[in-house]
């Protein structure tokens, strides 16, 4: 991996050069304590001090709702759609969200690649940016507090600039285009980078013991813990909507009044909604909120190729209207509280 330094006085020029690689999206403050990735035209529009966005960067690759094709029965044909087939740059993505994309890649790119997801990943530049945890972050516990790959460039702030890791050929292309803006890393820069990472890791206060978590969840199948939290849960699905690793979607056909034409739409789905388990004949394989809540925790706590399905971003706790704390539930499952 190539390591460089971007002096702070060159940052605005670097941002302008990025715009030649596509429309730039960065973290923007949208409320008192809420942030979202929005299109930005200048460096000053971004708030890089953010802890988390409400909706993760997943939205750029799996659209919350998108038309797949239109169909016409009389003509016996359909017209395929692919929205937003353009190059973009997502700036300021944190470690946990980059690691979440690796999990999404396992689903959408392995075996039978999803062409919509694949094309958007190909068209997107990922610029990572290091962060500081708050009381809800536990990515250190699940091994996602540092992104080692799956980005084009990653920026770590140091006193007089940014320590930059170049993570891909496209990242190298960006650096080459802006080569007059970067300088070589000196010993003092490396020392400062090491010290800043050491301090950042020491800032994590929330911990979750994930050793044997899958067994603990399986053994707690009949525990009253699930009923306790199901009674609190609204069943709204907010935890799924803000989760960077949830992969469920629904495919719906909308037929026009002529009953001959219509469109097929793909949209995000939530395993916390009653209809998620509804199948033909009116049967439902998870009819109760207890079953749906337990299923979600089992899904996030399960292993996929040796990696948890949770990256510890804290979104599900922060944005739960019932104030259900994800880590608290798992600590109860483990018998720690």
Image (cartoon, grey):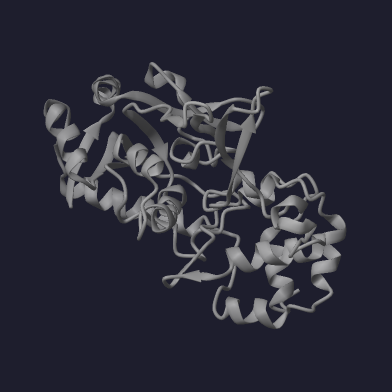
Quadrant of the frame with the C terminus? bottom right
> Could you say which is closer to the camera, residue 221 or residue 42?
221
Residue drawn at (28%, 34%), measured in percent from left and top?
A: 161
Count of numbered circles on the image: 0
Residue 284 point in image, percent of width and height: 76, 61
Visible residue check, residue 207: no
> Could you say which is closer to the camera, residue 131 or residue 104?
104
Q: Quadrant of residue 319?
A: top right
Residue drawn at (58%, 59%), measured in percent from left and top?
A: 205
Q: Report the side of 6 relative to 62 (left or right).
A: left
Q: Quadrant of residue 231?
A: bottom right
> Could you say which is closer to the camera, residue 212 or residue 132?
212
> Could you say which is closer to the camera, residue 209 or residue 7?
209
Q: Report the side of 335 relative to 3 (left or right).
A: right
Residue 45 point in image, percent of width and height: 45, 19
Q: Report the side of 75 relative to 329 (left or right).
A: left
Residue drawn at (18%, 52%), measured in percent from left and top?
A: 1
Q: Is residue 175 above or below residue 19?
A: below
Residue 254 point in image, percent of width and height: 63, 32
View extreme (front): residue: 74
Q: Is residue 117 above or below residue 298?
A: above
Q: Quadrant of residue 126?
A: top left
Residue 316 point in image, percent of width and height: 65, 50
Visible residue check, residue 309: yes
View extreme (top): residue: 41
């Amino acid at each position: 991996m190539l390591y460089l330094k971007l002096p702070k006085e060159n940052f605005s020029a670097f941002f302008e050069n990025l715009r030649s690689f596509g429309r730039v999206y960065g973290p923007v403050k949208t409320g008192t304590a809420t942030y979202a990735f929005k299109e930005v035209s200048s460096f000053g529009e971004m708030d890089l001090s953010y802890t988390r966005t409400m909706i993760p960067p997943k939205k750029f690759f799996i659209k919350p709702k998108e038309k797949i094709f239109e169909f016409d029965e009389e003509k016996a044909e359909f017209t395929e759609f692919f929205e937003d087939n353009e190059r973009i740059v997502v700036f300021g993505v944190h470690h946990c969200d980059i690691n979440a994309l690796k999990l999404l890649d396992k689903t959408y790119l392995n075996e039978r690649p999803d062409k919509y997801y694949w094309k958007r990943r190909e068209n997107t530049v990922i610029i990572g940016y290091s962060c500081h945890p708050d009381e809800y972050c536990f990515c250190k516990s699940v091994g996602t507090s540092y992104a080692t790959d799956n980005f084009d460039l990653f920026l770590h702030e140091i006193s007089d600039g940014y320590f930059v890791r170049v993570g891909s050929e496209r990242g190298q292309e960006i650096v080459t285009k802006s080569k007059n803006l970067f300088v070589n890393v000196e010993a003092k820069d490396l020392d400062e980078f090491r010290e800043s990472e050491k301090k950042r890791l020491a800032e994590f206060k929330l911990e979750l013991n994930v050793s044997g978590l899958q067994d603990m969840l399986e053994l707690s199948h009949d525990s009253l813990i699930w009923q306790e939290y199901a009674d609190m849960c609204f069943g709204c699905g907010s935890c799924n909507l803000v989760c960077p690793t949830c992969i469920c979607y629904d495919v719906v056909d909308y037929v026009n009044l002529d009953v001959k034409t219509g469109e097929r739409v793909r949209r995000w789905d939530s395993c916390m909604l009653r209809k998620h388990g509804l199948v033909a004949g009116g049967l439902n394989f998870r009819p109760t909120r207890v079953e749906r809540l337990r299923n979600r925790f089992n899904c996030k706590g399960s292993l996929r190729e040796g990696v948890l399905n949770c990256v510890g971003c804290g979104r599900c706790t922060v944005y739960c209207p019932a104030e259900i704390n994800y880590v608290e539930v798992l600590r109860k499952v483990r018998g720690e509280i």
